[in-house]
Image (spheres, coloured by chain):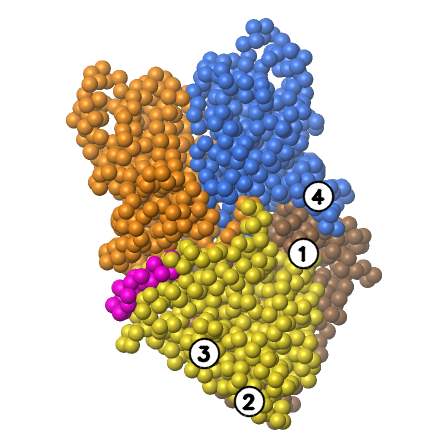
Chain colours: A brown, B blue, C orange, D yellow
Amino acid sequence: MIALDNHPSGRHFLQIPGPSPVPDRILRAISLPTIDHRGPEFGALGRKVVSGLQQIFQTRHPVAIYPASGTGAWEAALVNTLSPGDKVLMVETGHFAALWQNMANKLGLAPEFIKGDWRHGADAAAIEAKLAEDKGKVIKAVCVVHNETSTGVVSRIGEARKAIDRAKHPALYMVDTISSLASIDYRHDEWGVDVTVAGSQKGLMLPPGLSFNAVSDKALAASKSAKLPRSYWNWEEMIASNKDGWFPYTPATNLLYGLQVSLRMLLEEEGLENVFKRHDRHAEAARRAVRAWGLEILCLNPAEYSSSLTAVLMPDGHSEIKFREAVLERFNLSLGSGLTKLRDKVFRIGHLGDFNDLMLAGTLAGIEMGLELTGVPHKKGGVDAAMDYLVHSEVARGAAKRAAA
Amino acid sequence: MIALDNHPSGRHFLQIPGPSPVPDRILRAISLPTIDHRGPEFGALGRKVVSGLQQIFQTRHPVAIYPASGTGAWEAALVNTLSPGDKVLMVETGHFAALWQNMANKLGLAPEFIKGDWRHGADAAAIEAKLAEDKGKVIKAVCVVHNETSTGVVSRIGEARKAIDRAKHPALYMVDTISSLASIDYRHDEWGVDVTVAGSQKGLMLPPGLSFNAVSDKALAASKSAKLPRSYWNWEEMIASNKDGWFPYTPATNLLYGLQVSLRMLLEEEGLENVFKRHDRHAEAARRAVRAWGLEILCLNPAEYSSSLTAVLMPDGHSEIKFREAVLERFNLSLGSGLTKLRDKVFRIGHLGDFNDLMLAGTLAGIEMGLELTGVPHKKGGVDAAMDYLVHSEVARGAAKRAAA
Amino acid sequence: MIALDNHPSGRHFLQIPGPSPVPDRILRAISLPTIDHRGPEFGALGRKVVSGLQQIFQTRHPVAIYPASGTGAWEAALVNTLSPGDKVLMVETGHFAALWQNMANKLGLAPEFIKGDWRHGADAAAIEAKLAEDKGKVIKAVCVVHNETSTGVVSRIGEARKAIDRAKHPALYMVDTISSLASIDYRHDEWGVDVTVAGSQKGLMLPPGLSFNAVSDKALAASKSAKLPRSYWNWEEMIASNKDGWFPYTPATNLLYGLQVSLRMLLEEEGLENVFKRHDRHAEAARRAVRAWGLEILCLNPAEYSSSLTAVLMPDGHSEIKFREAVLERFNLSLGSGLTKLRDKVFRIGHLGDFNDLMLAGTLAGIEMGLELTGVPHKKGGVDAAMDYLVHSEVARGAAKRAAA
Amino acid sequence: MIALDNHPSGRHFLQIPGPSPVPDRILRAISLPTIDHRGPEFGALGRKVVSGLQQIFQTRHPVAIYPASGTGAWEAALVNTLSPGDKVLMVETGHFAALWQNMANKLGLAPEFIKGDWRHGADAAAIEAKLAEDKGKVIKAVCVVHNETSTGVVSRIGEARKAIDRAKHPALYMVDTISSLASIDYRHDEWGVDVTVAGSQKGLMLPPGLSFNAVSDKALAASKSAKLPRSYWNWEEMIASNKDGWFPYTPATNLLYGLQVSLRMLLEEEGLENVFKRHDRHAEAARRAVRAWGLEILCLNPAEYSSSLTAVLMPDGHSEIKFREAVLERFNLSLGSGLTKLRDKVFRIGHLGDFNDLMLAGTLAGIEMGLELTGVPHKKGGVDAAMDYLVHSEVARGAAKRAAA
């Protein structure tokens, strides 16, 4: 198999929880010729995407755009606001929360990690308790993953904000929205988040290679005295440049072309609220399929179900690795794997980004056939259950669509 | 709705019986810069595609390439071989056979049309009888549609050849393979066909805009004395030029780029035999779904089932037009309509070209949900029946795939 | 050399007089997925391009769009309006006029060919004389090539119209604008043309594969009684379908995507008048270079200079074929060849379509260096002369450009 | 002007010293659908590009690939090998050397900056002297920019290596090849470089968004004890993953598609040595044009001329900013600006990456006309001088080209 030069026939179903399938129009846009990122045409592009991103983050504050993948935006959030040895309160929602905590350690911070069972979101009460205990206010930041990509569990960010407020604690509030932004409702300003971390390859429907920090005034103020060394990630120059459409160093020009199209699709054509409803509906249909198969959804609290992905427990004694390999080989469908402590125990269905009913039906059919093919005990009827929901649930229409009708 | 600038979210399912979905690699190839069609680079491209096309048509004879859609290749077949007033025997397999016959009339030929019920392929015995009656050998050509796109019925081309031979009749044998070539096994030389007509936008997986004539020695000889006026379609200059990779007038350069990739995918990567088996398997799965719904397949003879498409009768009193509109609007799925006498009575499922199991599952799910949505009486379980077949039937692997394993 | 997989470094200069260089945005547009040409999205696209084309042809009359190259539109003009044996008056402006006349012969018409020296445009007085002689009004059509691609000579179409009128002759007036439309001012209605023939790959900046007939009421009326057999080219169905955005048979969908972008660029962004001025300016610069080299421009009458291309006579004893081969091999520049009686005697510089000052400077530099490389006697200073004109002549700005300023 | 939706006609000449013009084949490759970066197809791609990159860097050592622009690879080089407060010896060759030094400061290092006049490369003797003085071996690294993008001056990396060796100093040797790699001969292993820094958007002909570190054993060993905090840039995980074709976090998948094509073009089609010769030849032609204009080349030592770009001093009292604006507005040509202390004093001509004779001729014509247009005192004849050299100098042919001949 030689990458790009030999594929099985038909369209690949990329249903990992990101990168998500990139729409054709975005792929065409990123293939336009690279231009001078110091020229007037680029400046107009830059201003346009910065302003559109603010609507996506639901913020009036600056959004820094990095030529980097999401992991870079995690690092940017930490190094811009913290100093060596700073204590940060992080919440173990799953693999990615653990990686972020790991990063904090590597960067010389002192993360305290509120343990979790990888089946629930962040516990606002536990956060409140930890902060209340912290009489000396040594905790400098609270870090929560909004949508834990490894588990399909959403943490209620507004609730955690209230917990911080109740504790009257001055810690910064940082939230990872890498796999939720532009798929699940998220409100940087309303929820009082100080730094929101995001990437291009999920709800924004772009290839990987761009990542973002939305930054509150409080976070900006904190960055003035933060002592972790930083240069590439430095907000000061990035935000100052970005607001006029420029970059302090070479940006990922062609991905920005795609971002412009993505923003138009999300904001002008479909409308952000409709995007969220679409994902809610697909997620519910996916869960109905899982239940019909008699399999268990990893997320235990329905109030925390993810609309981006659904993680499914394999029955005991069955390997998700073998299952996914068979599904890829036979059905040209990529599913997400179980990560670290979930390794070989769960598979994940991505239903984020540019997605519709029949892509979901095809995906669920691939899973149902894969279960059969690999001898995983299950009941049939998952696709049927999903179809039953899809056909009877109401569909939100994009504004552009309505206008055209 | 403004074409190209505003789509519903997610991938469109283009499951009409052609144009078929164009693979990403082909779309990228056709977007490369146009070159000089008189320059050396083009000549190499031209020679390559002509030689690949011969393998596709299973012929050692010339294949003329027109910058035109398939209808043009129909006209080319007639005007190159026939003279005004010539009698041609045509077979009413459905709408497209009728259009071809209509064209023959417009061009001043005298087609005799063997009546058909649009639910069977060409009747070899009837052809034989007509030819046997024709003592004066005034019939100059027998024209048959291999895969009738309006009905999903395949005519057995080899059988009809034998019928012509039994009648010892010198008529030319012309076959339309527009919706079968490179999806259903077809053998220009072995089956003794004189002119094979084909287009780019079906099994060859290209956008529309190219069409073809494969031409036997006998047909070429006939063209020397044929009197219908012709210039654009004239084989003489086209074939003479094509064999060295050139064209007598400006060719559709960018589609030829795509054709080069298409030929590599079909011949080198998957292998033509595997392509046929893939389509057979998907067609069988589709038919099982139709039967499970309790709907009727238009094609009455299982020996004539099409592997490119399946036409399905709507229950009495139900409109396929409303059904398809609903399916397009709600599920972003395009299905084929009923044509002329089948108008509003059948819908057609395209499963030709670049296609795989999950694209089929998604398509069938769209239909099953659409039947529910529009209140068409049916049983559930169509997608299930298809999945059951897909998971248990053997999959033919492409040579390239095998080599890589 | 394997087409598409191995090129010399850097951008190819495609400066033949068509196909012209295709802008990046158009290439991206034609690579979007093919859609159902019977669906609502396509209909909107179809209506948009038909209406835009009318502005390009400067007509309120119908424009038929064929999936074919320009030669097909020639044939369409003839077969829709004429009957076997009809006399048509054609004018030998060069190779393409001769090919059109040749086609008329093949189609069973009786062309009378007004001789020409391939260095002048159509002689209105000669046309008038021929028509005046034709007391019996047996001449059914007068056919003129607006911009003769083989010679770089423009025929004054309005003048010829007046000649026909002076002769009070009812013949239809047909004009080939294949290499002038959308590069050189052309007015279908104002100049009283009955059928205008055009193609996609020149001023419209698309790959080849689309061609057009703009059709007057008089031509439409003539088509009712015209007896040449026709089907693919038949206006009746094509125009009836096109006006609502549809096609009687499968259209070249992806090229129509490109056409939509082309029309936006020409009509909305740059403005047609500015497009014409741009080409006039580049043509004048090219001619100044030719004169500076001491070479001779083929076109003898400055009132007939072409703004699409400039044909240049090689000095006696020097081969344009060897010259062009060397230029292609060494400088990656494609120039047009001498055709039939000009074979090996002239080369042609295309400066039509999507073109600008530095593309012209690069092209002229390739020629000047090629002359040196192949030992063709010439004076230096051609590029200098062109630069001198380019820098001092006024540039017309597109409306969009102005608005943005 | 709205980015991407409204351009002046014709091809833009992007002749800044990077991003360089991206070849069409690479643009098409980066627009292929994003795949799972944990799947088998991606692994094959990853291994292929890592191995190709080693040939480009002329090294057998690991090359780390970052989803980041070149500035990130600078940071990676420093944070992986150094500890807070470490002294590094840097050489002021120009703006980018100053930025790198600035970054070292921001990261808490103690750079010593050998002053320079921005018109010469690194002075090996000065480096030797500084190292010889450093009895305590407190200098941990010597950092040199190979090709200073702001000045068009090349530092002789092999000479500096010898200087370090003569001083018997254990400092690591780090080299920035951002604007030289794959345009100018560079030998990581032979020249004993410990960390080579590079990016995608110059000689590799890709859009920006990838950057690289080639890493010696000595550098890897140093990274074990280096104390600067790092996570995103951490070699350990990156190199361990990269060598099998994987990444520790989400890579810039689509740019890697383009990299695969770039490597094939450079290594298999043209051959790296021919690539270097091509750039040498174009640089010489550009300099001849500059001299003919009577303008001054910024680089004072011919042994240090850059083959990637040529920086040109504006005559006193003339603004390069106004000059470049006029050239962009009128001729659609982007040139590089003067940076910091060269602001408004020099303009820079990029002739790196995918480039050929006529692109250079067009570029130089734009400059010559721009000088005239803006009233900058100059002699004519620059384009002539360049053409004279181009036509008479020998051209190195790619291996693939030769084989095809």
Question: Label 3 vs label 4: CA separation?
Answer: 59 Å
- Determine the secondary structure under disc 1: helix
Res. B126 in view: no
Tell me the quarter of the picture where residue B260 sits. top right
Along the line of sight, the residue nearer the viewer: A368 or C351: C351
User: Which residue position is annotated with label 4?
Assistant: B398
The kind of residue on which mark 4 rests is: Gly
Question: Label 3 vs label 2: CA separation?
Answer: 18 Å
The part of the chain drawn in magenta is D365-387
On residue D120, the disc is: 3
Tell me the quarter of the picture where residue B297 sits. top right
- The chain under label 2 reads D
Question: Label 1 vs label 3: CA separation?
Answer: 47 Å
Which of the two marks, 2 or 1, is nearer to us in this view? 2
Whether discs 3 and 2 lie on one chain: the answer is: yes
Residue sitting farthest toward the left: C166
User: Which residue position is annotated with label 2?
Assistant: D130
